[in-house]
Amino acid sequence: EKLSSCLSSYLVRRWFTFEWFYSALDYPWFAKREFVEYLNHVGLGNIPRLTRVEWSVIKSSLGKPRRFSEHFLHEERQKLEQYRDSVRKHYSELRAGIRDGLPTDLARPLYVGQRVIAIHPKTREIHDGSVLTVDHDKCRIQFDRPELGVEFIMVL
């Protein structure tokens, strides 16, 4: 009962969508942990506890922390878009037969007939559907509920 009343709230559903529903294309990007990679790079990734002196050396080597600002968000968004473009290029080369195989961390590209869960562009709600066509950065989805019809969805 509490769950159903919670999910009836538009803001809760929106938070849930942003927090838990993202493209398989983006998964490797969001799974990457730069700080852990840095610790592995300097040879401290396997040490469970560090002394205060070691932490101060690490912090000083990283430099001044960035502010959480519009400029920072803009730069991060640009990096994400560059990553997405490179993955889309990889997928299109794979479809064209120019490239063989996928890196292990990338999801397989969408194909016609594949069952998907997508956000309907008009209702902004999550629904089941099937892929009808696949383009470079969008695909056409036939939603299971007939009243939702067929829509183009941006492939993030």
Image: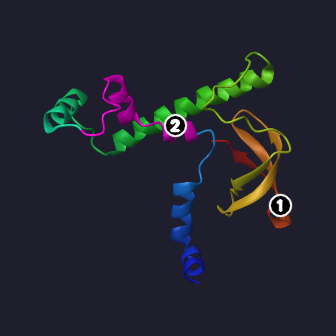
Left or right: 16 as drawn, with respect to 139: left
Q: Judge the density around disc 2: few (<14), some (14-19), many (≥20) Cα neighbours within 10 Å.
A: some
Left or right: 140 as drawn, with respect to 104: right
Give the x, y percent position of residue 119. Answer: 67, 56
- Point out which mark residue 29 bears: 2
Taking the spot 73% from the left edge, 17% from the top edge, the residue there is: 99
Identify the mark nearer the N-term, 1 or 2.
2
Write down the residue under mark 1: 144
Taking the spot 37% from the left edge, 34% from the top edge, the residue there is: 36
Q: Is residue 8 above or below residue 138?
A: below
- Classify residue 136 by image quadrant: top right
The amino acid on which the numbered mark 1 sits, given as a three-letter code, is: Asp
Q: Secondary structure at mark 2?
A: helix
Left or right: 43 as drawn, with respect to 31: left
Provide the residue span drawn in magenta. 27-49
Taking the spot 83% from the left edge, 41% from the top edge, the residue there is: 133
Give the x, y percent position of residue 86. Answer: 60, 26
- Classify residue 1 by image quadrant: bottom right
The amino acid on which the numbered mark 2 sits, given as a three-letter code, is: Trp
Residues 42 and 143: in front is 42
Taking the spot 59% from the left edge, 54% from the top edge, the residue there is: 21
Q: Is residue 1 magenta?
A: no
Residues 114 and 89: in front is 114
